[in-house]
Image: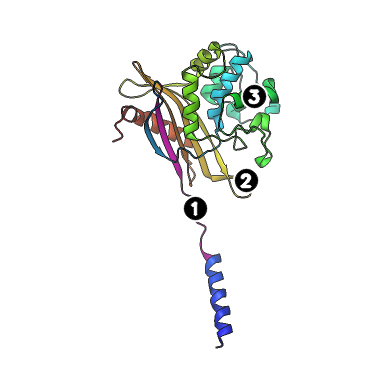
């Protein structure tokens, strides 16, 4: 056999091997970060906490701040808006909703009604003044609309480090919003009892990452739980995030992330990781 034929066969064989090799699944990205509210120091920080991802329904926290500051939202039970068929949402969301129900049951169409009432200019201005993530509310990926979908697997991204920084500014009154907006947002955020006397206030978020073609990839689910917690005079802000490489068929990934954080927080917030 001539050297030329040997070279061709070697290249052909290498090509066959390359084609036959299975695609390697992306590694999961995990983060848990907890800051002391008073000092801003990290009590616990582990994982890819500087990696930005879509905020998903954790964005209901800044949306509540915007809504109350602008007067679109009135109190914990007003306004009550009726579901409309044009929203085309799942059966779970087809109900009359007020601010408390909105946060508790994570009603997407209610968020979108708030941003429509804000308008593009005011909405983008709040995101910029909040210094929220990458500020990008233009939309676009997957054909998403910036005003009503930029936070849903679209253009807006935020890292766990940025989430806790934003939440600390909120808790300490450093955001450019009214005192009423601070108080009312805190009033409607879901509350959970944790161990060792801790009370947790937080919002979940769930969705999917996009593949190289810009399509949503159900095998790459994204889950968040962000908020604050208190025990006596001690207060912390936290973010836990999981961008996984496998489906979660039993329950939403955000519930897994939430329940794990609530279980872990008492020891982590006390500086006892083990």
Tag in front: 1 or 3: 3
**Tag 1's secondary structure?**
loop
Residue 94 visible somewhere in the drawing? no
| CA distance for labels 2 and 1 | 16 Å
Total numbered labels placed on residues in the image: 3
Residue 39 within the segment the image draws in magenta:
no
Q: Which residue is mark 1?
A: 25
Mark 1 and mark 3 residues within 8 Å of each other at the beta carbon: no
Instruction: Return the residue nearer the eye: 260 or 87.
Output: 260
| CA distance for labels 2 and 3 | 29 Å
Residue at image position (64%, 32%) is 137
Mark 2 and mark 1 residues within 8 Å of each other at the beta carbon: no
Residue at image position (41%, 25%) is 40
Q: Is residue 214 above or below residue 58?
A: below
Which circle marks residue 215 in the picture? 2
For residue 82, which quarter of the picture?
top right
Q: Which residue is mark 3?
A: 125
Residue 140 visible somewhere in the drawing? yes
Residue 225 image point, x, y percent:
46, 30
Residue 23 within the segment the image draws in magenta:
yes
Mark 2 and mark 3 residues within 8 Å of each other at the beta carbon: no
Q: Range of the magenta residues?
A: 20-37
Pointer 3 local density, CA inside 10 Å: few below 14, some 14–19, many at least 20: few
Instruction: Return the residue nearer the eye: 255 or 155.
Output: 155
**Tag 2's secondary structure?**
loop
| CA distance for labels 1 and 3 | 38 Å
């Amino acid at each position: 056999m001539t050297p030329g034929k040997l070279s061709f066969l070697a290249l052909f064989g290498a090509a066959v091997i390359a084609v036959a090799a299975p695609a390697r699944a992306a590694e999961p990205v995990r983060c848990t970060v907890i800051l002391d509210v008073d000092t801003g120091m990290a009590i616990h920080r582990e994982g890819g906490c500087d990696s930005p991802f879509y905020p998903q329904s954790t964005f209901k926290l800044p949306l509540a701040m915007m809504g109350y500051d602008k007067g679109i939202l009135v109190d914990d039970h007003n306004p009550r808006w009726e579901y409309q068929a044009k929203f085309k949402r799942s059966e779970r969301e087809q109900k009359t909703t007020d601010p408390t129900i909105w946060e508790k049951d994570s009603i997407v169409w209610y968020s979108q009604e708030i941003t429509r009432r804000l308008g593009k200019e005011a909405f983008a201005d709040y995101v910029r003044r909040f210094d929220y993530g990458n500020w990008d509310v233009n939309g676009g990926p997957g054909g998403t609309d910036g005003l009503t979908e930029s936070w849903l697997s679209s253009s807006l991204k935020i890292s766990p480090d940025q989430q806790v920084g934003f939440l600390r500014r909120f808790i300490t009154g450093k955001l450019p919003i009214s005192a009423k907006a601070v108080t009312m947002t805190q009033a409607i955020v879901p509350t959970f009892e944790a161990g060792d006397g801790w009370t947790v206030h937080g919002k979940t978020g769930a969705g999917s990452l996009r593949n190289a073609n810009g399509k949503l990839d159900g095998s790459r689910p994204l889950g968040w739980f962000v908020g604050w917690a208190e025990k006596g005079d001690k207060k912390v802000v936290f973010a836990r995030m999981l961008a996984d490489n496998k489906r979660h068929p039993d329950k939403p990934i955000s519930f897994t992330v939430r329940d794990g954080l609530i279980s872990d927080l008492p020891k982590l917030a006390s500086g006892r990781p083990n």
